[in-house]
Image (cartoon, rainbow, N blue to C red):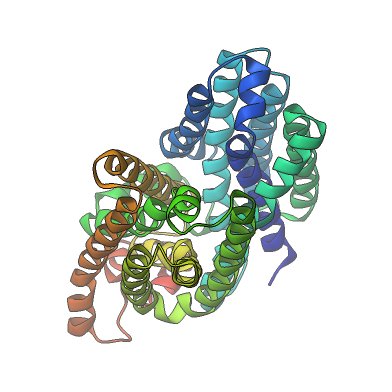
Amino acid sequence: MPLTVYLMAAGIFAMVTSEFLVAGLMPQIAEGLDVTLSQVGYLVTAFAAAMSLGGPFLAAGVLKLRPKRALAVVFAVFLAGNVLAALAPGYAVMLVARLVTGTASAAFLGAAISLSVRLVRPEQAGRAVSVALSGLMLGTLLGLPLSTFVGDRFGWRSAFWAVTAMTVAAAVLTLARVPGRERQGVGGSGTGGGIRQELAVFRRRRLWLVLSTSTLTIGATFSAFSYFNPILTEVSGFSTGSVPLLLIAYGAANLLGNAVVGRLADRHAFAVLMVGLLGNGVFLAAFALLADSRTGAVVFMLAIGLVGVTMNPAMATRVQRAGNTGPLLNTVHSSFITFGVLLGSALGGAAIPHFGLVSPVWIGVGLAGLGVLTLLPDLGRGRRTGPAAPAGEEAATRGEEETTGTLVTRAS
């Protein structure tokens, strides 16, 4: 695997750490900016909203640039936002900073996945996505506790400065390794009309169904994950101090599952997603039923960690086969994933006052079931075309570039 792919993971790690940083330092930031905890909570929402809505626009804005220059622009935008957050004199400036960093994070995620796929052989695409997205898993596993530790020890602003330092290091190393010749367009062809090619893919109805699978897959997981802390303490009976250790174990399960899915995604993306969604639905139901048992809660929380967000490499592979490998589509895909986070957590939060703390987990079961339904049309399609037929046959006939066409022929 090229070193550049691992550097993509380092950049994602820095940006994901910045995303989670606010959630881990809510009391300190609230005190420092003289606002309420709920107002600080809106900073988390603003970051996610900027990823969903702003990321595709920034990705489109740098689409015609060569990868090195595009990444330099995105790194610069993120650094500007992160430095602004570290220096923010008040809440309004901090809100703007979070919008800027959220937008840049989504654009970087899309560009990183696109570039990682193009740097490896077609049969290694899923593994490359898995390696790049390991930065996301490590951000949950290590970035959140480390930023919380730094913020507690040296002040919340120091945590933002630490992320700035990590980002600068990742940017310098990445820009030193990224090839400077090819353009970002579909397949890196560098031919004119790149933006038109990337926008044309959104006319395909099947692509929207594929994107909705990703939203429901992540929504199912985050409807539960968002409320693990109160469930584990108030229902399962764990102490507050033990929850961070349990969440670290959950993050380790994410990392393991991501590595396994990355190995399988190229040849078996559809099967991995079907098994993952069915398994997630079963594990979520078991967690809900056994939430009052410490052993049951831990076992099935870790099981959810193995089959939840770990589906990302398979989801990315399926989206690319239904569309293309370009950065704009990958950024839009990250927007659908982020919308899944918002959907799952919002539905879960709305259910708790009426149905109790465990109700978000049952909502996750329902979302996983809906995710399975979005896969069924492809199940019938696979039977018609046979296992070796192109899942993205439609893309090939529309004249996609060589890289996309090669990926398309390796349908799950």
**Relative to residue 233, is residue 174 drawn left or right?**
right
Picture coordinates of residue 212 (x, y %)? Answer: 29, 54
Total marks shown come to: 0
Height in image: 55 above or below 14? above
19 w.r.t. 225: above or below: above
Q: Is residue 380 left or right of residue 123?
A: left
Quadrant of res 210: bottom left
141 or 101, which lies in front? 141
**Residue at x 25%, y 47% (from the top left corner):** 355
In the rendered view, does 209 fall on the left or right side of 35? Answer: left
Residue visible at 62% across and 39% down in the picture: 24
Where does the image place residue 308, in percent across and percent down from the top left?
A: 44, 64
Q: Is residue 396 above or below residue 109?
A: below
Report if residue 184 is visible in the image. Answer: no
Q: Position of residue 77 (x, y in %)?
A: 64, 31
Q: Quadrant of residue 350?
A: top left
Quadrant (top left/top right/bottom left/bottom right) for the C terminus: bottom left
- Compare residues 367 and 274 and report the one nearer the observer: 367
Q: Is residue 345 visible?
A: yes
Q: Position of residue 100 (x, y in %)?
A: 57, 28
Q: Quadrant of the N terminus?
A: bottom right
Residue at 46% x, 33% y is 45
